[in-house]
Image (cartoon, rainbow, N blue to C red):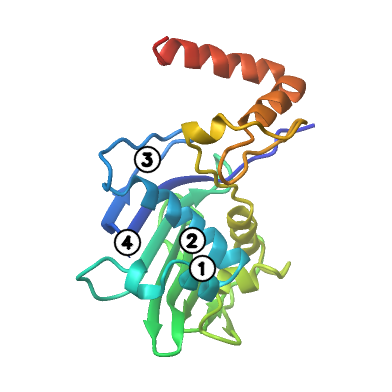
């Protein structure tokens, strides 16, 4: 069976999100480590992914309410939109795709001020947007390999509170949009601490870490049963890189 390709994020930019006034991370690798003192924004970086995931699975308003609305979400003493920008590839050989999301707030609540997807199919030429929305209205190019010359279709969402990628990505006629939606809704995020690993977990192998990471022994059991070679490699690397 051929190995399933997993999309990889190569770039992240965040503006006006909590402690991250203007963060830009380039050349992100599959294993990336953030080091810094307390309060420097390490946890906030991971909350960016949690926030985006919740926007896609639970909706923008719920993710916004959960974090104390813009009073707590937007960086202090700043104005303007909260902005997220990801650059990713669906496979190693795929074109680099940029996803841009800007969130604003008005009296009735949060809304998507701007949302777009762009790529450059060929090695030359300018990137072009195959999805471009503002406040719930915009254009999208359908098809497996959207091109700049292809017809743009006008779309209007029921509310500016909805994400275009999350909404349109449910339709088979938008495979590139759908691929991003599946990627983000498939994220599994865990905040693992040493205290949680000391708890006594339920018995039985489990494929993924829980949100708190308290089932680490279960995941190790799963790896031992299903991917013993990979587990041995992980333990060997840890023993060489982590003292004692």
Which quadrant is home to the N terminus? top right
> Total number of numbered labels?
4
The residue sitting at the left extreme is 77
Q: Position of residue 180 (x, y in %)?
A: 59, 58
Q: Which mark is residue 51?
A: 2
Q: Residues within 10 Å of mark 1 (few under 14, many from 20)?
A: some
How far, Cα to Cα, is label 2 from label 3? 22 Å
Give the structural element (helix, strand or loop) at label 1: helix
Give the structural element (helix, strand or loop) at label 3: loop
Asked if disc 1 and disc 2 are in contact, CB closer than 8 Å, the reply is yes
Residue located beneath label 3 in the image: 27
Q: Position of residue 147 (x, y in %)?
A: 55, 65
Q: Residues within 10 Å of mark 2 (few under 14, many from 20)?
A: many
Q: Position of residue 4 (x, y in %)?
A: 69, 38
Q: Is residue 64 left or right of residue 159?
A: left
Residue at horizontal 67 percent and vertical 33 percent from the top: 201
Residue at horizontal 27 percent and vertical 48 percent from the top: 39
Which of the 4 quarters of the picture holds residue 98?
bottom left
């Amino acid at each position: 069976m051929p190995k399933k390709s997993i999309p990889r994020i190569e770039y992240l930019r965040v503006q006006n999100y909590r402690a991250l006034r203007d963060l830009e991370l380039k050349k992100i690798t599959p294993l990336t480590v953030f080091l810094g003192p307390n309060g420097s924004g390490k946890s906030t970086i991971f909350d960016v992914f949690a926030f985006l995931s919740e926007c896609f699975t639970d909706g923008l308003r719920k993710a916004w309410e959960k974090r104390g609305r813009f009073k707590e979400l937007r960086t202090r003493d700043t104005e303007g939109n909260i902005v997220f920008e990801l650059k990713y590839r669906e496979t190693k050989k795929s074109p680099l795709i940029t996803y841009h999301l800007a969130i604003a707030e008005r009296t009735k609540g949060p809304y998507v001020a701007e949302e777009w997807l762009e790529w450059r199919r060929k090695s030359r030429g300018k990137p072009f947007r195959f999805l471009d929305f503002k406040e719930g209205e915009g254009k999208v190019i359908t098809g497996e390999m959207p091109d700049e010359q292809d017809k743009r279709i006008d779309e209007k969402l029921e509310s500016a509170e909805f994400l275009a990628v999350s909404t349109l990505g449910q339709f088979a006629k938008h495979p590139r949009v759908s691929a991003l939606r599946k990627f983000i809704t498939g994220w599994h995020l865990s905040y693992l601490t040493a205290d949680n690993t000391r708890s006594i977990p339920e018995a039985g192998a489990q494929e993924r870490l829980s949100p708190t990471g308290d089932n680490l022994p279960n995941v190790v059991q799963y790896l031992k049963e299903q991917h013993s070679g990979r587990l041995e490699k992980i333990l060997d690397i840890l023993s060489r890189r982590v003292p004692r």
